[in-house]
Amino acid sequence: MAAVLLALMFSGCDNRSAPTTTAPAEPGATPPAPATQVQAQQMCYRQVVGRDTTMVRLLISGATVTGELAVLPAEKDRARGSLQGTLAGQQIVADWQRVGEGQTQVHEVTFTLAGDSLRWREGARTEKGGKWVLANPAQGYEYVLRKVACSPQR
């Protein structure tokens, strides 16, 4: 009942901005650039093969990408962790803070956005510059995750 009353109270509020005045600019001063805001976009993807599930949650704001990746096989060790990377065109290159098998390691992952799917490869890795990279990026298992509705984060 209280929520309904609050909603009714705020629905009658006038959301128009009050006029503002600004001091005149100093001669020769450069006017401030307008603030640009990039709307962050959240996207979620999932692949289920048998009883194995892989999930990715991405938050894309301009060229900055953050999120989570979880590889959840039914019969093997699970791996999950946060993602942080960049978007260029339809490709995201990110560092995955992979937590699994009692260890935390940084894995470089490359995702490709393709319509309503997200693709990435996994295979043999080698350590390079403090992170684990694919030994041969053209080989290995290709994950193809389908876009799904994002569930609320816990």
Image (cartoon, grey):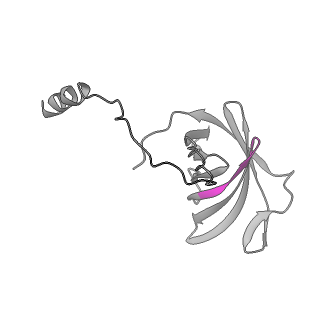
The extreme front residue here reads: 27
Q: Residue at x 25, y 29 (%)?
A: 13
- Report the span colored magenta: 83-91
- Residue 35 on image: x %, y %: 56, 46
- Compare residues 67 and 98 and report the one nearer the observer: 67
Q: Residue at x 25, y 26 (%)?
A: 11
The part of the image, by quadrant, that contains residue 105 is: bottom right
Q: For residue 49, say whether it is visible.
A: no
- Compare residues 10 and 71 and report the one nearer the observer: 10
The part of the image, by quadrant, that contains residue 77 is: bottom right
Q: Is residue 96 left or right of residue 129?
A: left
- Residue 74 on image: x %, y %: 56, 50
Q: For residue 128, say whether it is visible.
A: yes
Q: Considering only vertical position in the picture, is 141 above or below 133? A: above
The part of the image, by quadrant, that contains residue 118 is: top right
Q: Which residue is drawn at 43% across and 47% down?
A: 153
